Amino acid sequence: MIRRTRKAVDPPVSGAEVQAAEHEAAKQRILDLAEAERTPLDDTTRAVRVGRRGRS
């Protein structure tokens, strides 16, 4: 993780701003995990078609 050092010109960060930044970072991690585990639609469609052929 890359950390940005605070400069003297940066305004003080409030607790609410820190909490919002942490919330956004957590949300992004969850979205990244979901995307990594996602099954492509083509694979899902193919599996459903194969399953339906077996029932006939």
Image (cartoon, rainbow, N blue to C red):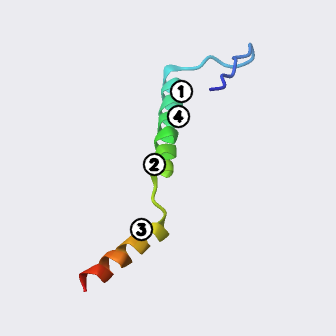
Among the 4 quarters of the image, the one containing residue 46? bottom left
Q: Nearer the viewer, residue 38 or 29?
A: 38
**Mark-to-mark CA distance, 1 and 3:** 41 Å
Q: Amino acid at mark 1?
A: Glu
Q: Give the label, 4 or 2, closer to the camera.
A: 2
**Mark-to-mark CA distance, 2 and 3:** 16 Å
Q: How crowded is the residue under tag 1: few (<14 C-alpha within 10 Å), some, or many (20+)?
A: few
Q: Secondary structure at mark 4?
A: helix
Q: Secondary structure at mark 2?
A: helix
In the rendered view of the protein, which quadrant contains the N terminus? top right
**Mark-to-mark CA distance, 2 and 1:** 26 Å
* Spot occupied by residue 34 in the image (x, y as percentages of width and height): 45, 48
Residue tagged by mark 1? 17
Q: Nearer the viewer, residue 9 or 36?
A: 36
Among the 4 quarters of the image, the one containing residue 48? bottom left
Residue tagged by mark 4? 25
User: What residue is at 54 percent from the left and 20 percent from the top?
Assistant: 14
Q: Earlier in the sequence, mark 4 or mark 2?
A: 4
Q: How crowded is the residue under tag 3: few (<14 C-alpha within 10 Å), some, or many (20+)?
A: few
Kindly identify which numbered label has been placed on residue 34.
2
Q: Are marks 4 and 1 in contact (CB under 8 Å)?
A: no
Q: How crowded is the residue under tag 2: few (<14 C-alpha within 10 Å), some, or many (20+)?
A: few
Q: Give the label, 4 or 1, closer to the camera.
A: 4
Q: Amino acid at mark 3?
A: Thr
Residue tagged by mark 3? 44
Q: Residue furthest top?
A: 8
Q: Secondary structure at mark 3?
A: helix
User: What residue is at 52 percent from the left and 45 percent from the top?
Assistant: 32
Q: Are marks 4 and 3 in contact (CB under 8 Å)?
A: no
